[in-house]
Amino acid sequence: MAFASRLCQRLGHHRVAARHYSKALNAAAQDLPKLSWLDLRGTGLSAAERLAIEELLLRHDPLGRCWGIVGLHEPTQNKILDFALPPYDWNTQRKLATSQLVDEYGHHTGGVNQSCTIILGIGGKPEKLINIDAARDDGVLVLRRFSGGGTVVVDHSSLWTTFIGRNSMLPHVKPFPREIMKWSVDAVFGSAFESWGKQFKPSRRQTLVFKGKSCGLSGGVGESLILPPSPNETQEIHNTDTPLFQLRENDYVLGERKIGGNAQAIVKDGWIHHTSFLYDFVDNNMEYLTLPDKRPDYRGNRSHNDFLVRLKEHYGEKSSKNAFFEHVKKGTNESFELEEVSLNDVLTIATEQFGGLQEWWDTKCRTKVVKL
């Protein structure tokens, strides 16, 4: 009886503390800026369609909202947009259409590499940044996006994240690339990678299974009750195999190796920051990129394959691509009040503003196909 009394007293204290903590969280949430959350997983949209939607929301959202957008995307196969894909020779296109060669994603290849897309920054020069002969011979799609930054190769394993900020809602974020990147680490990605890493750590919680009354915390008999760890059990076990996530110059890195490409665009009332994180990639596809003249000091002369690292190598054994997005959402939710928005909501903006996404692409959209 004495043990049960002490247990009930302890649990009662935890319940009161939990109520106060919940109230504090609710009060803090009222002060958080709002952000529209768009999850494009499962939509089948291509890289080009993703970029078209991002710029549409940056420049033409009638409500001027902050946005968080995540997703996995087809490198080349469009769902909505209609434009010619390489190779641009009609006879080769006809051979491709009748080809019996199919890749693991069901694409008819005919010797054409449809597994990736090369994306240049708005000021990028193909002759300096791409191995043009190899990319042309393999029929690789090349896009020029609306934002700055360097050149990336994206494929089915690229984890896309995008944040659109408004100066009026985030006045503490100075509209400069480095300041935006620092904000992204402090507000979202630092927390996201920390929680993703903790996913692999053993739990120190205790579970009590007991009969009879439950001290007012639960109503059944034989229920499981999870207790918080005691002060002696709060020491964390660190995953020493995973290098620290951090911002290095203008790159997200694990240790000394880059984990994704990022870029920004600044407009009058806000900015966009988008990243393609490398969950996995095909080594040969990275050979389409040349060693850029302008590169961070910590890279030195390392090749792309020596400079980059797959997130799968450190997180993939016990996790997944989808888990990454859930941790990003969790991190975002700590800094914003999230409102779920659907793809149809976004396409309605394109229709009302331009007559549809195709019309937006054909007229005002700055992302374009580059013919090598």
Image (spheres, rainbow, N blue to C red):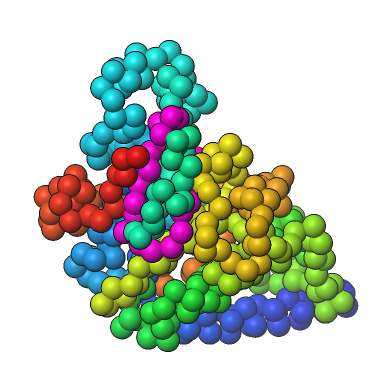
Q: Residue at x 75, y 59 (%)?
A: 242
Which quarter shows the N terminus? Answer: bottom right
Relative to 195, say whether 361 is above or below: above
Q: Is residue 191 visible?
A: no
Q: Tell me if 66 is positioned left or right of 355 in this view.
A: right
Q: Tell me if 174 is positioned left or right of 302 in this view.
A: left
Nearer the observer, 61 or 141: 141
Where residue 344 appears, x then y in whole percent?
26, 49
Where residue 119 appears, x then y in whole percent?
41, 49
Which quarter shows the C terminus? Answer: top left
Where residue 315 appears, x then y in whole percent?
68, 51
Relative to 247, say whether 318 is above or below: above
Nearer the observer, 300 or 150: 300
Where residue 156 appears, x then y in whole percent?
49, 40
Q: Tell me if 314 is positioned left or right of 35 in this view.
A: right
Task: Report if residue 157 lies within the magenta region.
Answer: yes
Q: Find residue 29 and report its image quarter.
A: bottom left
Nearer the observer, 219 or 266: 266
Disc tally is 0
The residues colored magenta run 136-158
Task: Report if residue 218 lies within the magenta region.
Answer: no
Q: Residue at x 80, y 65 (%)?
A: 238
Q: Is residue 94 visible?
A: yes
Q: Find residue 92 and report its image quarter.
A: top left
Relative to 97, say whether 28 is above or below: below
Q: Tell me if 219 is positioned left or right of 155 in this view.
A: right
Q: Residue at x 27, y 77 (%)?
A: 269
Q: Residue at x 22, y 70 (%)?
A: 63
